[in-house]
Amino acid sequence: MKKNGFSGVILLTCLLLSGLSMQAGNVVYKLTQRIAVPGSGWWDYLAVDTQHSRLFVSHADQVNVVDLKTNKAIAIIPNTPGVHGITFAYDLNKGFISDGQDSSVTVFDLSTLKTIGKIQVTGKNPDAILYDPFSHCVLTFNGRSSNATVINGRTGAIVTTITLPGNPEFAQTDAHGHVFVNIESKSTLVRINATKWSIEKEWSIAPGEEPSGLAIDVAHERLFSVCRNKKMIVSDAVAGKVIATLPIGSRCDGVAYDPLYKRIISSNGEGTITVVQEETPNLFRVLNNFPTQTGARTIAVNPKTGRLYLSVAELEPGQGRRPVKPGTFHVLVVAP
C-alpha cells in the first residue's frame, strides 16, 4: 500500500506539473483587428491614454488619435513635423509631442486635443519624450545632440539641459525621483536624478548592443532594454546592473511592460513579438514569438486590458527607406 500510495503521489505530481506546462505553453497572442489610420508617411511611437481610452499614433507630420472604445480614428493633431513620441501629464490635462524635424515640442489640451503651443528644445531632433510626475517636468531626449531638455510642464519654460554620454534612445521614469534612458551609441543605461537633474549612474548593458526601446516595471524596479543584436537586457534599476539576458526577434525598436499579466513584449520588425514572462523580479522566461506583420517595430500596451498596439504599413518596392504605399497604414491590435 505504501508503494502504491507513493506511486500515486508521483503520478499526481506529474499530472499537475504537466498541466502547468500545458497552461504555460497555451499562452497565445493573436492579431484581432487592423485599425485603418488616415494619412501617409512613416511612423514611430504610440501611446495609450488610459484616462480617455485613446491611442495616440505618431505619423509623419501629424498624430492620429484612435478611440479605443470603437477602435476608430477620431482626430488628428497637425503640424508635428518628424513626430517621434507622445506623453501625457494627467495632472496638468496636457499632452506633449516631440517634433524631430523642427526640434520642438507640441503642447496640446488632453481633453479637447487642441494645440496649445510650441516649445523649442535645446538640442537637435528630440526623439523620446516623457512626462515625469515627480518633478512635473517634460524631458526630450535629443538624438543628434546627445543631450536632454528639461521643460517645466506647467509653464513651458526650459529648466535645464542635461549633457548625455552618447546618443539617447527611449526613456522611462519611476515617478519617484529617477529617469532612465538607453544610450544607443555606448550600449549603456543612464539614471538621472530628477531633483538635481544630473546623472547619478551609468552602467553597461553588455551583452546587449545598441539598445533602442526601454520599458519599466516600477513595482519591482526592473528595466528592460531591447537591443539590435536580438537581446533583451533586464537591469536592476536601484543597483544599476544587468541581472538577465533573453533572446528576442530581429529589428526590434520598441518594448512594453504589461503589469496586468506581468509580461514584457518586444516588437520585432521582422514581423513578430517576443513575449517574456516575469516569474519573479529575478526570473524571466520567453513564452514564444508570435506573428504580427513585417515592419511592425513599435508598440504600446493598454495596462487595463493587456491589448497591444503596433503601427505598420506596406512599403513600395525598392531599397533603403522606401515610401509607404498610400492607404496601407494601420494599427494592429494584438490580444492575449
Image: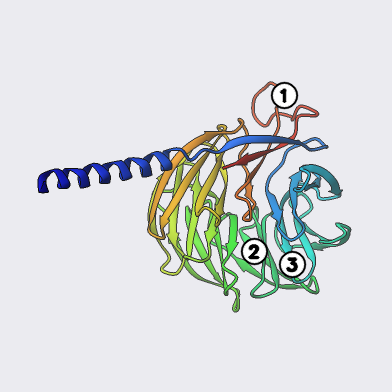
Q: Residues within 10 Å of mark 2 (few under 14, many from 20)?
A: many
Residue 264 image position (x, y, % from top left):
51, 50
Q: Which mark is residue 148?
A: 2
Q: Residue at x 38, y 59 (%)?
A: 282
Q: Which mark is residue 316?
A: 1
Above or below residue 156? Residue 212 is above
At mark 1, the secondary structure is loop
- Which amino acid type is marked by label 3? Tyr
Q: Residues within 10 Å of mark 1 (few under 14, many from 20)?
A: few
Would residue 40 be found to the left or right of residue 235 on screen? Answer: right
Q: What distance separates the C-alpha of mark 1 from that of mark 2?
A: 35 Å
Q: Nearer the viewer, mark 1 or mark 2?
A: 1
Regarding residue 125, the answer to whether it shows in the image is: no
Q: Residue at x 75, y 50 (%)?
A: 56
| Residue found at the far bottom of this picture | 195
Regarding residue 218, the answer to whether it shows in the image is: yes
Is 86 or 142 nearer to us in this picture?
86
- Which amino acid type is marked by label 2? Ala
At mark 2, the secondary structure is strand
- Which amino acid type is marked by label 1? Glu
Q: Nearer the viewer, mark 1 or mark 3?
A: 3
The residue that label 3 is drawn on is 90
Q: What distance separates the C-alpha of mark 1 from that of mark 3?
A: 39 Å
Would residue 188 be found to the left or right of residue 71 on screen? Answer: left
Q: Nearer the viewer, mark 2 or mark 3?
A: 3
Q: Quadrant of the C terminus?
A: top right
Is 238 or 26 nearer to us in this picture?
26
Residue 182 image position (x, y, % from top left):
54, 56
At mark 3, the secondary structure is loop
- The mark that comes first in sequence, 2 or 3, is 3
Residue 277 image position (x, y, % from top left):
45, 49
Is 80 or 15 nearer to us in this picture?
15
